[in-house]
Image (cartoon, rainbow, N blue to C red):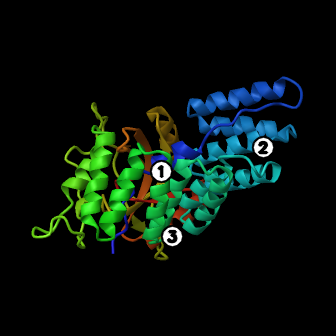
Amino acid sequence: MKKVVVPVFAALLTASLVLVQFTPAAGGSEKVLFDKGVSLMKQEKFQDAVGVFSELIGMKTVNPDIYKNRGVAYMRLNQYDLAIEDFEKTRELKPDLKGLYSNLGVAWYYKGDYTRAIKNYNMEIALAPENHYAYFNRAICNAELGEFDLSLADVEKSLALSPDFYLAQCLKGDLLAKTGKPAQAREAYEKAIAIDSDNPYARDQLAGLKLPEKTAGADQPVVLTVPERRPKQPETRSKSPAPVKTAPAVAKEPNGEISPIKAKSGPSHGRYELQAGAFRKKQNADVLYQQLETKGYQVRILELTRPSGIHWFLVRTGVFDTKSAATAGRSKIKTEAGMDFIVRPFDRF
């Protein structure tokens, strides 16, 4: 049975990775450094921001704001283990800090541990029961686990707190369609369209929703084919597309292990690939691209646009037919390159 397609995952990041402000205990130099780190974050220079926050920590500055912000920077670099370490240190220093557990939820979500993500969202909701994003994010995790009733309950709570939350309305439609309630799904998509008529997601899902002809108003099981089709306007193109970099290939080492890098020939597409980083600014993606290319890796920059309109530049390598092969490739390249990667569907978020 196909999984529910969540409208966007950007909300997991934009809602949870919130920079906090720093109140130094003494002296002005620490605040200057902290402000510099925040400025670098706003410019999406995350690696530089890590350096600044690390310098502050090296000065024996004990402040949860510093660890949390460095954790945010690690998150944006897809270095989730390091992010979790910083968020856990933040929890030691200030366990009741709002937004902290949402950050941990995001990190565990992208590591594929949805149960741990849910536990952290539970704690976030306990601290901030008015946070509609926390309910929405927990709904996504429950959907990944196939707990559709729990997911739908969280979506309803999110919408009760924020009735005009477009993404929650879309997820509600997806869940209702998935659980054999097409008429209710149609109603949810129509409400989403009323909230944001310019966003194509709900409109596209509604177009692919098939109701039984004789009982169009009844809730009968349906099969949604929309999540598998590609949009009419390819999301991988910008208005003025730059030359597309060659997609990486897959090769087998003499010992039979798959190498996602340094291969000169092979298939140009597959089911999975590895993502080294995701950036809003192309120049930041170019920096990582050059770093990996200099090391001899075949990489490309994939341009995708979320339904919310946010444009991303994704630095990726490797082509794999199975998720297990991609996971094995991730372990290998993580050791070789000295940085972490995540497994993503080929050519998609």
State how far apart marks 2 and 3 are (Cα): 35 Å
Q: Earlier in the sequence, mark 3 or mark 1?
A: 1
The residue closer to the viewer here, 83 or 347, is 83
Identify the element where label 3 is drawn: helix
Q: Earlier in the sequence, mark 2 or mark 1?
A: 2
Identify the element where label 1 is drawn: helix
Q: Are marks 2 and 3 in contact (CB under 8 Å)?
A: no
Q: Which residue is mark 3?
A: 328
Residue at x 74% of width, y 38% of height: 53
Mark 2 vs mark 1: in front: 1
Q: Residue 248 location in percent, x, y?
A: 38, 55
Q: Which residue is mark 1?
A: 160
Q: Amino acid at mark 3?
A: Ala
Q: Which residue is mark 2?
A: 64
Q: Is residue 173 visible?
A: yes
Quarter-of-image position of residue 175: bottom left
State how far apart marks 3 and 1 are (Cα): 43 Å
Q: Residue 128 location in percent, x, y?
A: 64, 49
Residue at x 24% of width, y 48% of height: 203
Q: Amino acid at mark 1?
A: Ala
**Crowding at mark 1 (Cα within 10 Å: few <14, some 14-19, many 20+):** few
Identify the element where label 2 is drawn: helix
